Amino acid sequence: MQWASWSAFFNMGGYAFYVWVSFGLTLLCVVWEVLALRKRSAQALRLSRLLAQE
Amino acid sequence: MNDAWLIILKRDLLLAFRRRSDVATTLFFFLIVSSLFPLGVGPEVAVLSSIAPGVLWVAALLAGMISLNRLFAADFTDGSLEQMLIAPQPLALLVLAKILAHWLVCGLPVVLLAPLIGLQYALPNDALLVLVWSLLLGTPTLSLIGAIGAALTLGVRGSGLLVALLVLPLYIPVLIFGAGAVAASQHGMSAQAHLSLLAACSLLSLVLAPLATAAALRISVE
Amino acid sequence: MNDAWLIILKRDLLLAFRRRSDVATTLFFFLIVSSLFPLGVGPEVAVLSSIAPGVLWVAALLAGMISLNRLFAADFTDGSLEQMLIAPQPLALLVLAKILAHWLVCGLPVVLLAPLIGLQYALPNDALLVLVWSLLLGTPTLSLIGAIGAALTLGVRGSGLLVALLVLPLYIPVLIFGAGAVAASQHGMSAQAHLSLLAACSLLSLVLAPLATAAALRISVE
Amino acid sequence: MLMVQGLACLRGDRLLFKNVGFELNAGGLMYVLGENGSGKSSLLRILCGLLKPEEGGVFWNGKPIDLDTDIYQADLTYIGHLNGLKDDLTALENLQISARLAGNQVDDAVALNSLAAIGVARCANLPVGVLSQGQKRRVALARLWLTRSQLWILDEPFAALDTASVDVLAARLGEHMSNGGMTIITTHQEVTIHAQSTQTLRLSA
Amino acid sequence: MLMVQGLACLRGDRLLFKNVGFELNAGGLMYVLGENGSGKSSLLRILCGLLKPEEGGVFWNGKPIDLDTDIYQADLTYIGHLNGLKDDLTALENLQISARLAGNQVDDAVALNSLAAIGVARCANLPVGVLSQGQKRRVALARLWLTRSQLWILDEPFAALDTASVDVLAARLGEHMSNGGMTIITTHQEVTIHAQSTQTLRLSA
Amino acid sequence: MKINWFKYSSPQTFYPLAEKMIPWFAWLAAILAVAGLYISFVMAPTDFQQGEAYRIIFVHVPAAWMSMVIYIVMAAWAGLGLALNARLSAMMAQALAPTGAIFTLLALVTGSLWGKPMWGAWWVWDARLTSELILLFLYLGFIALQSSIDDPRRADRAGALLALVGVVNVPIIYFSVKWWNTLHQGSSINMGAAPKMAATMLLGMLLMALAFWMYTVAVALMRVRCIMLERERSADWVKALSLGAKS
Ligand code: HEM
Ligand SMILES: Nc1ncnc2c1ncn2[C@@H]1O[C@H](COP(=O)(O)OP(=O)(O)OP(=O)(O)O)[C@@H](O)[C@H]1O
Ligand SMILES: Nc1ncnc2c1ncn2[C@@H]1O[C@H](COP(=O)(O)OP(=O)(O)OP(=O)(O)O)[C@@H](O)[C@H]1O
Ligand SMILES: [Mg+2]
Ligand SMILES: [Mg+2]
């Protein structure tokens, strides 16, 4: 175990900003991509249903 | 009912939102062009930061110019432009709304992206700030003046190149004041004078360009 | 009868001759863009001459790119392209003829004008010579690679901007070697290595680009 | 009242027509007929003020239309060859925007009604880009159920419409005329439209 | 001999036609008929190899046309909706260039003769840009007097032609067929063309 | 046993198949990511030169790897689609592009975030950085071309051709950028500054890279399903499916 305490962990030896933004952005991209895809597929289904009901 | 210009503004923004990838191309063009220079000039930080104001502003000019054909072309081909011309509203106002939308979609993103690219050119922080301010004051003029050129070349053969020839020379004052502002702040001087001149250009073109564009549109739609 | 490519070459040159003003616009674009920089960067000779290779090459790149829409667009709209596709001749050969004509009309003038602009940037004589050589070896690659992009975007919405996005990244090696050659000679080094690389790029694209362009044209004409 | 005097139209270096004049009163319908290329669309564009005539003038209630433009344009609805629709917006959005641009505030229900009137209610929430040619045309024409302007100028409104829609549109035009409206129309088809007075203008190429 | 089997054509997401098949022998004439948008032009483009069919194949003398493309294309003359003329070149220059591109070397006199045959000899030295629609079409069609290929594919060749030229062209087509040529043609007009065998293909939208 | 590939390569059969495959890859990605993160934050020791900042390596390097791998895979699918006229291959290529672009962007951003504390600059015009930036442009060009062609068949084939041209050009770009940098002057900053990698670090990076791989597959499958729905909007199977689906 590398970390003496949670705060040391979050502090990342003074590089908190760089490390957490890196990982945070990666997480953000992943979450965003998945959500966007779910929305897109729901929208596509809705549109084809509208067309099918014609 | 004088909110017609608001309708046009909203419509154009909605359209841009529905076609996000189209919009992004202007931004990418700016990004690519401004990344070309270091590849041509070499990676030395000192040189890059000294040419950064000029290069970034030229890239903004070119991006502004190349995005112009999106301003009226679609409305022209699908007939919306005719409808705007015969709407019981002052045409110049509608034109202004379109220009505003175009700036929000094509100009503003460039303004926001510029500091990031400025970082790649190792511009110091206060110069970055001035860069953003100068672009904020200057790019509306680019859209305004460009609109005249775009309207004049609507439906003309080889309009892409033609619009460049018409519009780039008119952009030169904006380039000089804009790049001058950033360079001044880089050299530790005040950028105030340059920025005021940019603002003055913006105001002048804000008054004149919509009228000229409206007139040009009437000619082009005949 | 395998002189079909000669027919196409002659026809395109004849057409360019009949429309001389259209041709001049590329040259003007190059002129304007490369004159914008001194306005943006400031008049110091030392800075200007150190960025000259990069700036001139970037201007050549942009001029090459912006003239691309003239390569196939007219043939596409008037139906000559269909006739070329069904001619009993290898399409790649005809395409090569068109590219050659395009280079003679849009590339060569830029090569010839460049030293004049180089003078304005205070480039020394031997660097000017290398500039001309590098452009001579490099601009054909621009036309060749550009042809692929032009063929891919034929008849596509917003093709002007799109072709920039597609083609500029592919131009980068040419830019690097071309500007590198001039910069090397400026610093008193030999430009040989860069020029050979440029020539190699040209040869490679000479072999591959016409084939790719022919394939792209078949896709676009459907 | 619309009055037209001594119009001449030059396109390129060809004189399409000259000395065209007529009067159109409330409740009046006018057909403009002629072959392809005879200048029908050009005439209609002149009447809208989109094209300047080579000679002659157009007067609305006695005033030249290029003087009191805004008043004239508030009284005018023009639907040309082009539909003026955005492919990326839905039929409903398109209809509302064009109506509001012409000065008619409309809410969703009213707009939907007018789409229903011409039989494209089911397309209301589809982007116009996926519609067929005839459906697009009908979305454009749905504006005629919303507008309150007196003068309608329609360039081949029946083209690309199936027979049922042609009848619906003809009925709507008849209603407009019986309310004192005026219509100028070009068409290549035989369509019966009821009007208090009907006149025909034939252009020859 | 041209043989076509089980062709299907998809445009956008619409299936225009499927299961189209026929044979065309020396001296044969084939009409392709159908409404606007029914896929006539698309079919002709498939037959030329300009468009890939969704299904099926086209065979020339027993070989698929996308295998021995050059041989097939040497036997083929296609004139589509577009004339393939350059506005800035004269009629004579245009004609010579397109003939030579198709592999027929022609001198001035021969080219002039073929322009004369379809009645546009007087336009020979005018840039095509100043000609009228019908004259342009005739310059494009003048190639039919120069070509020696066996299979002609013509997309609405009679459109925009006046009656005299229609007769001249029909006679030329008859001559071609009597020499053992084949023609595939689309038209909206009734024109009598003499051929050893005539067949009709009707596409429905 | 003979597998009917043709059957699986038709959208109608692949659509439900992909639906079944997605959770597997998603869960694999999640498990691998958790393991990778555990190693990278808990097990991996502090770097004596770079301090804790080096932990960025656990996203940066996998992202950079993926950005390159995805481009090659995408071009391969595209080429396959072009050669065999297979719709599914072209759709896979189209589905991979945005994810590839995102990883490229992540490599750039995390690299910058690493560069600032290490080099004192967000960006230097180093060869590797520059070629990564150009890779981003190549992705964007591919996406923009496909999205501006309305006819999907044409979009597929045009995109495929572009991807192939790009793949030929990638090594050229890579070497040109490398030479460009070294011919001028020695870069004052050396990318190889990272010390010999400890085994735990390597393991962490590998796990994270595998997690990204699985994630990519899952997301590409999701996207390919959307593309199928959008393209075959008027096909009977989509109509039946959309009418059957809830909400
Ligand atoms: C915007 C900035 C950066 C970009 C675009 C970038 C890009 C890349 C790329 C493309 C790779 C994969 C190369 C390969 O595996 O061959 C890579 C690997 C790597 N990068 Fe970066 N990088 C950036 C900044 C940094 C910084 C600041 C550092 C550390 C000081 C760094 C350290 C590394 C390391 C250690 C590797 C692994 C090397 C290897 O596996 O061979 N990078 N980077
Ligand atoms: N912008 C223009 N510039 C030059 N000539 C034009 C222009 N627009 C139309 N013309 C020409 O004017 C003539 C008349 O065109 P117009 O569109 O008015 O015909 P029309 O009677 O409406 O035909 P249609 O029945 O096909 O709609 C045509 O010969 C056309 O080529
Ligand atoms: N490039 C294309 N992309 C998508 N759809 C197309 C394309 N070209 C044509 N279409 C569509 O295919 C259908 C048939 O077109 P085609 O040109 O083959 O018809 P046609 O029978 O020749 O009609 P016409 O009598 O008007 O010449 C039309 O609905 C058209 O909109
Ligand atoms: Mg008309
Ligand atoms: Mg047709």
Image: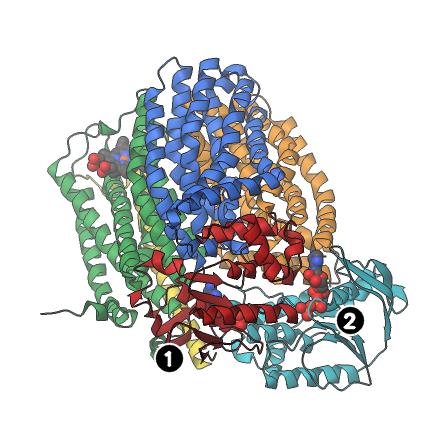
Chain colours: A yellow, B orange, C blue, D cyan, E red, F green
Q: Residue furthest right?
A: D62
Against F70, residue D92 (above or below) is below
Q: Residues within 10 Å of mark 2 (few under 14, many from 20)?
A: some
User: Is the CB–ligand 3 distance for label 1 below 8 Å?
Assistant: no
Image coordinates for residue D36, horizontal then vertical, percent: 68, 69
Circle nearer the viewer, 1 or 2? 2
Q: Secondary structure at mark 1?
A: helix
Q: Same chain for marks 1 and 2? A: no
Against F76, residue C171 (above or below) is above
Image coordinates for residue D89, horizontal then vertical, percent: 54, 65
Residue type at numbered disc 2: Leu
Which image quadrant for residue B139? top right
Q: Residues within 10 Å of mark 1 (few under 14, many from 20)?
A: some
Asked whether C218 or F95 is in front, the reply is: C218
Task: Identify the residue shown where x is 26% and y is 43%.
Answer: F59
Image coordinates for residue B57, horizontal then vertical, percent: 54, 33
Q: CA distance from mark 1 to mark 2?
A: 53 Å
- Specify the subunit that label 2 lies on: D
Task: Identify the residue shown where x is 56% and y is 53%.
Answer: E111
- Specify the subunit that label 1 lies on: F
Label ID, residue C122: none
Task: Identify the residue shown where x is 80% and y is 75%.
Answer: D201
Residue pointed to by mark 1:
F243
Label ID, residue D203: 2
Against F201, residue D17 (above or below) is below
Q: Can residue C21 be seen here?
A: yes
Q: Can residue A12 be seen here?
A: no
Image coordinates for residue F22, horizontal then vertical, percent: 24, 64
